[in-house]
Image (cartoon, rainbow, N blue to C red):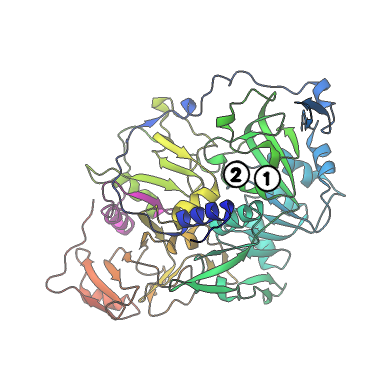
Amino acid sequence: MICLPRSNNLLRLRAASVCSKSIPHTRQFASLSRPISSQFASDREARKYQASSALAAVPSTAWRSIHHHTNVPTSKLCPDAKTALKLSGLKDRDTIAIGGFGLGGIPETLLNALSSEEDGPSDLTVASLTAGVDSFGLGRLFEAGKVKRMVSSYVGENKNFERMYFTGELEVELVPQGTIAARLRAAGNGMPAIFTPAGAGTMYANGGIPLKYSPDGSVAVATEPRPTQIFDGKEYVMEYALQPDVSFVKAYKADTRGNLIFRGTSQNANPDCAVAGKVVLAEAETIVEAGELDPDEIHISGVYVDHLIQAKDNEKRIERLRETVAGQITDISGPRGRIVKRAAKEFKDGMSVNLGIGIPTMASSFIPKGIHIELQAENGLMGLGPYPDPSMDQYGDADFINAGKETITAIQGASSFSSSESFSMIRGGHIDLTILGGMQCSGSGDLASFFIPGKLLKGMGGAMDLVSSPSTVIVTMEHTAKDGSPKILKECSLPLTGKAVVDRIITDMCVFDCDKKGTNNGGLTLIEIAAGISVDDVRAATACSFDTVKGEIPVMEEA
């Protein structure tokens, strides 16, 4: 018998739950959506706390006696963001972690206060899942010249950010979305490093991604190789914990002790930033007195929060407002429509599915009759519903968005969670199917989808985590580029998102199966072909060899 400390056993059980494929099982899901306004309702909703001048004047070091020998602070409330920033001790060249995904759940008040401090801290390293948009939220920090380096997974919505990167004004360290969340959580857990399959075998792990450009467009600094290790025959990347000097967090509701509650997908990486920071500043839309929150409803204990402010800036801008009308589906024709409808045939009853931005997301509008699936968004929701329908009293809500930053609803029985929990589901094999787009695929199942050096900066987002997971991976893309050049190659010429990760490729011309494990000597097999397309047409548009199924090749099915 080997006896381990209880904490070690718990950690090993936790690691197993997020690193191994779960036993297949069937799920039944409700397909009806419900008004967002009814979600997360509470009897205490009306008991909103407005910070009075008397309470605002109470210093955060005030104490009261609980029991005979235990003293705890009565309030962590600060009068404003400027005071909280001063108390945080944030200084030049510090690292700050900022909660939010896109514009959802970002700490607007704290960001506006920091960007407005002309003589305030600068040369900062900022860690956040995304880089936001121009002239709002995080965008204001870049424009104010406060940031030296950005650690992020997706930066494709901020044009000024992209310009600053390619002209050498800003260093950018691209990191998989799930890895950022896990590194933050590791810091909060007191663990110095983690191992993840995300990025193994790619330029991300091997080094060489431009970290900084020179003004003339040449690469000034590139990333170094990351340590790797083999476990059970699979390569993993070692990632160091990410502990920021200060974290900015946005909550839906808080009490004066700093206990936090989040709402919908605005939870995202906020809890992960909160547990990781050496000093944590939280802003909340609503603040109540200590004791008014149900302990079972609290997402983050106040033990992690140092200073709390009332959120004064609550524009909660919606990046992509999408609405629908019940029963109406916009038909999609042409090559893209063929891909979308064929991709929908991949859904099987009871599946948990993650859909990428664009064509993959469109496929959810063509789920075959009698098939029920549950959609997961990596920004923190299991059970995505349709776009909100104003005729059913559903309206766009900044706290409910999908990975493409579009407004969505949640089905009955949906659940929301943090970014680290979301990617635990993905890495642990609890998502059955992943469908995402791509720039290039290789005959051996490699995928390139996030970066064109010197030209286009998007970031890998959650794609590296998704394709390295145990789920089935299907890539949807047009067969050729706009100039007619092939996108399916013998070897990808662009930096890889994943090596030997693709199970199936669906294009406007055909469907290929990928022998990514090399069980049949590797390569592609043509299993379906679009109407009016010949095998010779496919060969002419494909820059690698492929086999065909025996007998007559079936015509591509469409939902």
Q: Is residue 374 above or below residue 462?
A: above
Using residue 474 as the reference point, say whether residue 240 is left or right of it: right
In the foreground, 526 or 297? 297
Residue in the picture at 43% in, 43% down: 382
Residue, disc 1: 137
Mark 1 lies on a secondary structure that is: loop
Residue 333 lies in the magenta-colored region: yes
> What residue type is disc 1 on?
Gly
- Residue sitting at x 35%, y 55%: 433
Residue underneath mark 2: 103
Q: Position of residue 408 (x, y in %)?
A: 45, 39
N-term-proximal mark, 2 vs 1: 2
Instruction: Indicate the position of residue 209 as horizontal and vertical percent values.
Output: 60, 72
Is the Cβ of the residue at disc 2 closer than 8 Å to that at disc 1? yes
Q: What span is colored magenta in the figure?
A: 332-359
Quadrant of the image occupied by residue 54: top right
Q: Left of 332 or right of it: where is 389?
A: right
Q: Is residue 454 above or below residue 476?
A: below
Q: Is residue 47 visible?
A: yes
Check residue 326 for magenta coloring: no
What distance separates the C-alpha of mark 2 from that of mark 1?
A: 8 Å
Q: Position of residue 104 (x, y in %)?
A: 58, 42
Q: Percent x, y for residue 345? A: 25, 53
Classify residue 270 by image quadrant: top right
Name the amino acid type tagged 2.
Answer: Leu
Helix or strand or loop: what does disc 2 sit on? Answer: loop
